Amino acid sequence: MRRALWIVAAAALVAVVVIGLTQAKPQENEAKAPAFDLQAARRQLEGSPAPLAALHRDANRLLPGGTKAFEDRLTKLEGHPVVINKWASWCGPCRAELPILQEVATERGREIAFVGVNARDKRPAAERFAERFPVPYPSYEDPDEKIARQLKVPANFPATVLVDARGKTVFTHQGGYAAAEDLQADLDKYLG
């Protein structure tokens, strides 16, 4: 009986290591993606409604404050649909989907709010990641996943939650988006 438990434990350990190594290697999308110009994205987003413009002013910042600060931001965004993306610097699929989020947030950021939730991460690693992969919206620190749990976001990474203009969660996408068209289709379907 003990031998069987040791075999199961060893197999589980090997699976965790293989998954970790798979997520740690550079992803296909990352290698192909051109450098993102955050300043050009900010210029493209100029003239957004005030609550969205406030998001763009905080572009690529990692904001503290936990659930209270996050809830306050969502309250200020009422009347606008919101895309919430849970990510972590150590997550390979998060890195792979970043060019998609950069593109779509820039194209649709004048009508839809985009907000990140940096979960289960260390601030220095998250800041280095954000410096390397900037986005035209802020992220909130969520090291213990309190924000994610409150939103009922799945435990896997990444995950994207779509919230309608009334503040109701209408769709949760588990895993990374493979193409901008897929994210655009979900935005059109669930957020109008």
Image (cartoon, rainbow, N blue to C red):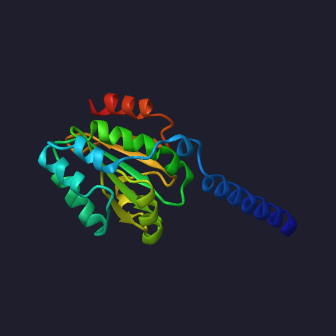
The residue that appears at 75% across and 59% down in the rendered structure is 14
Q: Residue 67 vs residue 93: left or right?
A: left
* Number of callouts: 0
- The quarter of the rendered structure image containing the N terminus is bottom right
Q: Quadrant of residue 101?
A: top left
Residue 148, image x and y in percent? 39, 57
Residue 150 in percent (x, y) is at 35, 58
Q: Is residue 68 visible?
A: yes
Residue drawn at point x = 49 percent, y = 55 percent: 155
Q: Does residue 170 show up?
A: no
In the displayed structure, would residue 10 be above or below residue 32? below
Name above or below for residue 23 compared with residue 111.
Answer: below
75 on left or right of 15:
left
For the point 80% across and 65% down, which residue is it? 5
Q: Which of these two is toward me, 177 or 74?
A: 177
Residue 160 image offset from top left, x and y in percent: 41, 45
User: Is the C terminus in the top left, top right, bottom left or bottom right quadrant?
Assistant: top left
Q: Is residue 30 left or right of residue 86?
A: right
